[in-house]
Image: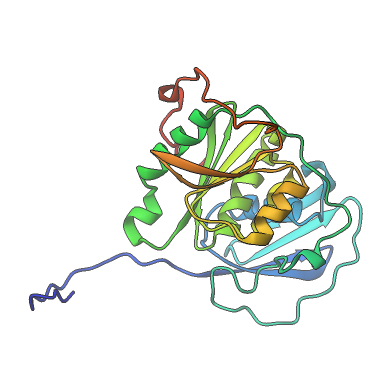
Amino acid sequence: MYTREGAVHVRDEEVQGEHALDVHIDGTLAMRIVCSPSDLIELVLGRLFSEGIIQAEDDVDFMYLCEHGTIVRVLLKRKRALKPVEAPVVPSCCTGNKVFEALEQLDDDLRPVRPIDWDPAWVFALADVFAADTPMHRKTFGAHSCYLAIDGEVRYVCEDLGRHNAFDKVVGHALKNRDDLSRAVVFTSGRIPVDMVTKAIRAGIPVLASKAVPTDLTIELAHEFSLTLICSAHPDSMRVYSDPRWKDAPPRAGSWDASALPEAPARA
């Protein structure tokens, strides 16, 4: 490491790794995901759910991760006609993942979420926990993180190269444990483009929060599908871009005690 003053320091540093994962669905190579090599079953389960390929964990008949962690084979109870993947894996945190790029590409099965009475104190408390950092990011400064909380309790914390992957990992954990996603608040470290909002809506998650910013189409989509969208969420302030409960005035913070939110646990 070189400093501006001319000092030179030699040291070992941990860097983020890139892992390629092929997902075969009913014998067809349907996805190639570039990710961090953790929570791979949960990643695939969450991806299948947030992309509308399955409606619940019970739609999966069988799922197998090979010993090298490079191939996941999935058998569905109800077979789907899937287009095989032909493009090579691209070494990027997001490129190579199946995402929606524009509103025109949204499927007809997207339905509004059911709003909940959320408390701003929940999001502030999540921002506090996020500010304490996560293990992979603390070591490499190259990871996105995602938190899923239900009724003010952090259930899952996952990290990954890509924000989409981290989101799908916490959703996958929730599906495996049969948590009620209709009461969930998800806090992500990444910006919120259309595909991230689409994932939340399809998963039935009513509140999506981020330390980063949305786009114009993101806000439009959140309004259309009754998603509460909170961005620039920090320990001292947040910006609410969409809240379907609002009529004449924004909600007031309740008496919920932010100290009741535990520190982020290790991955479930």
Say whether residue 59 is left or right of residue 67.
right
Q: Residue at x 44, y 33 (%)?
A: 125
Residue 65 seen in the current view:
no
What residue is rendered at 32% in x and 64% in y?
14
Q: Say how the picture is coloured.
A: rainbow
Looking at the image, can residue 84 be seen? yes
Closer to the camera in the image, 161 or 240: 240
Outermost residue on the front side: it is 248
- Residue 44 is left or right of residue 147, and the answer is right
The quarter of the image holding the N terminus is: bottom left
Q: Residue furthest top?
A: 255
Percent of width and height locating residue 143: 44, 59
Q: Residue at x 59, y 45 (%)?
A: 170
In the rendered view, would you say 35 is above or below 257? below
Question: What is the x, y in percent for residue 142?
Answer: 40, 63
The answer to whether 51 appears left or right of 1 in the picture is right
Residue at the spot 64% in from the left edge and 73% down from the top edge: 96
Q: Give how far across and how far down residue 219 sits, in percent.
A: 66, 53
**Horizontal and vertical percent for residue 94?**
58, 69
Name the residue nearer the viewer: 129 or 243. 243
Residue 236 or 146: which is nearer the viewer?
Answer: 236
Q: How many marks?
A: 0
